[in-house]
């Protein structure tokens, strides 16, 4: 601690240069925090997607349906525990232009497939007995200010209700999900879609199937078997794990995760070079002072440590402030008004950010530090 004043004076030797270096690194880690938050939003649910769940979609495209009769055929395959089906509803609430994640499902088979979604038993019982019932994720309920017992009108661009009717749902339950799972969805009964829709193609068709298998190691073999079962039929299928399905769904608008990482990497690399340049200039300007320290008996290890501590101080302080401001910004909530399924800076990304600060500080200071450590007193005084 006795060398802290020395480090502090060295850092602020050139106030103008140090200030701009601090601002550069501050901005770099502020952007890192925001970009990682966006990356998490676009990959929401992927990390906890089940490897023991397979998703069957129409081979042509996800928006093409599959026959309801496939459910019984899939359930008879050895190794299959449960089969459920989903249908995309494209529901929108009030005057919002962006659809909610609204899915028609089979309440008889859905709980056995999605065991991680927890609905209070009394709420689930009410939902099963209510043809217009719906269950919603905790995050969606909080965002829309819905509570159990509310009646919610939706509209859909895919399904028109029968004349004189509308799409109205009773919020019968709110489900909780583990961290990283999607709790921004609304589920309702497929039978209600079937009964209330004026679109004839709905009858006997569903959007896609989710199959829970007994052994995740058999996922590839069972995927091939399912696709072979329906090969050369009017509704051929393409099967993948739920994790693969979620990753593919998330990258339909581009590989957002890779783009965010690429941008963050370029920004951090550029400002890392700024920090390295600052340290190199700082050490070069202090050649004579370093020689005096060595003359006074400072060992090479102490010189090395002083320069590295100075470099770490610049990066960690400014980077920490930038990452801290990013965290505060994220705590303010989704600036898009709910267009992102999640808006949070994960603890993993915070730890990664801190690790990158330490790495950047060490890398920026290591060459100048070794140069100062190897400096000969006579050479230094001659230059002075």
Image (tube, helix red, strand yellow):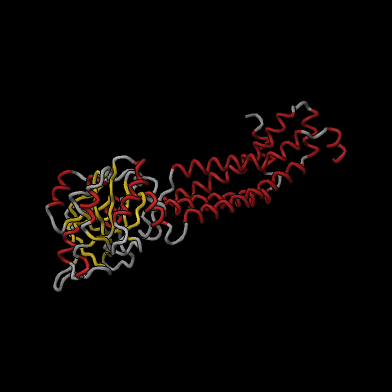
Q: In the displayed structure, does residue 128 sit left or right of residue 6?
A: left
Q: Residue furthest left?
A: 129
Q: Residue at x 44, y 42 (%)?
A: 347
Q: Position of residue 64 (x, y in %)?
A: 31, 64
Q: Residue at x 51, y 47 (%)?
A: 323
Q: In the displayed structure, does residue 29 sit left or right of residue 19?
A: left
Q: Quadrant of residue 58?
A: bottom left
Q: Residue at x 15, y 45 (%)?
A: 122
Q: Position of residue 313 (x, y in %)?
A: 61, 40
Q: Position of residue 308 (x, y in %)?
A: 66, 37
Q: Quadrant of residue 146?
A: bottom left
Q: Residue furthest right?
A: 382
Question: Where, quadrant-wise, is the C terminus in this rendering?
Answer: top right
Question: Where, quadrant-wise, is the N terminus in this rendering?
Answer: top right
Q: Is residue 208 or residue 128 the one in the foreground?
A: 208
Q: Is residue 214 or residue 302 the one in the foreground?
A: 214
Tell me: residue 3, above or below residue 322.
above
Tell me: residue 288, above or below residue 14.
above
Q: Position of residue 166 (x, y in %)?
A: 17, 68
Q: Residue furthest front?
A: 232
How many marks the image carries: the answer is 0
Q: In the displayed structure, does residue 347 sit left or right of residue 300?
A: left
Q: In the displayed structure, does residue 122 sit left or right of residue 218?
A: left
Q: Residue at x 52, y 52 (%)?
A: 261
Q: Is residue 228 or residue 210 the one in the foreground?
A: 228
């Amino acid at each position: 601690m006795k060398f802290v004043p020395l480090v502090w004076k060295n850092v602020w030797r050139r106030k103008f240069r140090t200030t701009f270096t601090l601002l550069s690194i501050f901005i770099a880690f502020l952007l890192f925090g925001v970009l990682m938050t966006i990356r998490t939003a676009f990959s929401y649910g992927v990390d906890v997607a089940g490897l023991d769940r397979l998703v069957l979609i129409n081979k042509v495209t996800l928006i093409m349906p599959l026959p309801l009769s496939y459910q019984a055929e899939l359930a008879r395959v050895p190794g299959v525990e449960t089969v459920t089906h989903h249908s995309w509803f494209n529901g929108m609430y009030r005057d919002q232009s962006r659809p909610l994640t609204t899915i028609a499902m089979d309440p008889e088979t859905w709980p056995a497939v999605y065991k991680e979604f927890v609905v209070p038993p009394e709420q689930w019982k009410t939902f099963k007995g209510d043809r217009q019932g719906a269950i919603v994720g905790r995050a969606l309920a909080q965002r829309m200010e819905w509570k159990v017992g509310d009646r919610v009108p939706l509209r859909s661009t895919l399904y028109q209700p029968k004349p004189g009717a509308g799409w109205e749902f009773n919020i019968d339950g709110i489900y909780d999900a583990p961290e990283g799972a999607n709790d921004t969805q609304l589920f309702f009964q497929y039978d209600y879609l079937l009964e209330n829709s004026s679109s004839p193609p709905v009858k006997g068709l569903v959007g896609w199937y989710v199959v829970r298998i007994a052994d995740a190691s058999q996922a590839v073999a069972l995927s091939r078997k399912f696709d072979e079962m329906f090969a050369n039929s009017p509704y051929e299928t393409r099967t993948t794990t739920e994790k693969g399905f979620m990753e593919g769904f998330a990258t339909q608008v581009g590989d957002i995760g890779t783009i965010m990482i690429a941008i963050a990497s370029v920004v951090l690399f550029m400002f890392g070079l700024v920090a390295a340049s600052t340290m190199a200039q700082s050490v070069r300007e202090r050649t004579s002072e370093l020689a005096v320290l060595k003359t006074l008996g400072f060992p090479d290890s102490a010189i090395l440590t002083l320069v590295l501590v100075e470099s770490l101080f610049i990066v960690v302080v400014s980077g920490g402030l930038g990452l801290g401001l990013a965290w505060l910004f994220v705590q303010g909530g989704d600036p898009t008004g709910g267009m992102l399924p999640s808006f949070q800076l994960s603890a993993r990304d915070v730890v990664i950010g801190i690790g990158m600060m330490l790495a950047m500080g060490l890398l920026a200071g290591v060459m100048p530090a070794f140069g100062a450590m190897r400096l000969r007193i006579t050479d230094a005084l001659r230059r002075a």
